[in-house]
Image: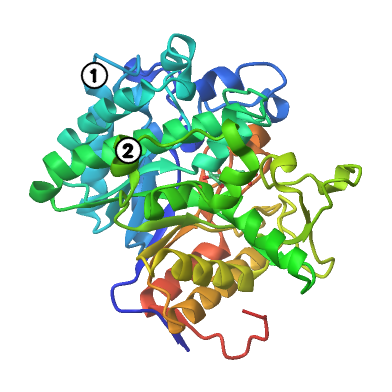
Amino acid sequence: MIQFPKDFVWGSATSSYQIEGGATADGRAWSIWDAHAHTPGRTNNNENGDIACDHYHRYKEDVALMAKMGLKAYRFSISWSRIQPDGQGNVNPKGIQFYSDLIDELIANNITPWVTLYHWDLPLALQTEKDGWLNPEIANYFEAYAEICYKNFGDRVKNWITLNESWVVAILGYGEGIFAPGRKSKDEPYKVGHQLLRAHGKAVQLYRNKYQQKQKGQIGITNNGDWREPLTDSKEDIDAAQRSLEFFLGWFADPIYFGDYPKVMRDRVGDRLPKFTDEDRALIKGSSDFFGLNHYTCSYASNVDPNAPISNQVYGNGGIFEDQYVALSSDPKWKLTAMKWAIVPWGCRKLLEWISDRYGNPPIYITENGCALDDVVENGKVTDTLRKEYYESYLAACSKAIDKGVNLQGYFAWSFMDNFEWALGYSKRFGMHYVDYDTLERTPKNSALWLSKAIQDNGFDFSQNDVEI
Ligand code: PNW
């Protein structure tokens, strides 16, 4: 029997643009994701979040399903342009009302709200008129928006996450251009990353100075990181795996824990990597009460000789290749999800241990973990056995990490329900609840039933399992 610590936070997560719909309801204005998804060719079948899961109108039904599962916590994000349509100035009272009602509904059902302030849906006006995350002024707009949230919701919300996955915003939004705002550059990701960190720092400073004492909440940031296992035990490959982790997770975590970017990034990126002023450093260092981690998969990493010709195979989910010279690969024995992401639970444990060692054993919350599968409803049931095995084995790996001293305090399954998977539209299903996009009916999948039991028992039987963790 695997048992989790007494106050372990069992949650599930979603984000605003992926589930809400109601894209222009009650005064909401477009975000960069509305504009991106409405640009032909950007998403699978040109799908968009206009309706999504219609959570905006069905949130009570959704909270009832969460309560039925016994979820202790629910992580959702606020659509900035729903409560501040232009990204600055006027506040939309109906937007405030929606989130206020959602929060009340959660609390009435004994579910603790965890609120992400920014999950990629920047108000479009800030992009078109202010140049989005490239503009140093954006930190001030973000701070002002954060204050609206603290003021209106902070009496009831005690867990704040400033930004979701800065790496994705920087690399996929400004490097590869597959996510909003769809820019392709080798320099902008580093500039954008810098402004994201500054904006996070400002929002945290404001919370700590003006709200934390009274509201008694915690505030942090969520970064995404997958594990990098050295392909061989050569020093070159061990260094390559470490370098890859530092470019991926260290990029955004080192400034928060140490006050600067990893040395390997400063050495390799040179002048293209912005420098922190003393003021910014003071703002950012120590600016997270916990380490929020979104984790999905694992790759092998190996060194690439900078003089060798670059082949296509060396590109991958690692950032800007020429700055790293790391090749990613996988083991053909690893099972794959519908995203073609490998299922490697021990990678999760190793990453948790890496974070714990590098950053001084901070409290960690896994704020996302899960998988997409090609689910089908048959006789009212979804037999998503591989998803159940995914949750089970990743949670077992988490438990092993806890045994080894990692201060992991909670786990949020991604996702509560199937939703708009960004550039992949509705083609990828990550949910524990199946959503029929014609009728918008929700059906709990078997994985939801399994997790519900694990929550109730605060653990599960893993003794008959020989999966490596
Ligand atoms: C995360 N990658 O996104 C997000 O926080 C969620 O909104 C999303 O639905 C979920 O993971 C599943 O994709 C990521 O390419 C998207 O490395 C892409 C990557 C990583 C995370």
Circle 2 residue: 278
Is 331 positioned to the left or the right of 311 in the image? left
Q: In which quarter of the image is residue 140?
A: top left
Q: What residue sits 62% from the left and 74% below the top?
A: 346
The CA distance from mark 1 to mark 2 is: 33 Å
Residue behind mark 1:
91
Q: Is residue 121 left or right of residue 94?
A: right
Q: In this view, does 171 lie to the left or right of 283?
A: right
- Going by the numbered disc 2, the residue's amino acid type is Asp
Q: Where is residue 374 in the image (x, y as percent from the top left)?
A: 71, 52
Q: Which of 271 and 139 is in front in this view?
A: 271
Location of residue 125 in the rendering, given as x and y in whole percent from the top left corner:
42, 12
Q: Residue at x 49, y 40 (%)?
A: 166
Q: Residue sitting at 57 percent across and 58 percent down?
A: 370
Q: Is mark 1 on a helix, strand or loop?
A: loop
Number of residues whose C-alpha sits closer than 10 Å to that of mark 1, classed few (under 14), some (14–19) or many (20 or more): some
Does 89 sit above or below residue 374? above
Dividing the picture into quadrants, the one containing residue 76 is: top left
* Residue placed furthest toward the left: 214
Ligand 1 in which quarter: top right
Element class at badge 2: helix
Give the percent coordinates (x, y) of residue 250: 52, 53
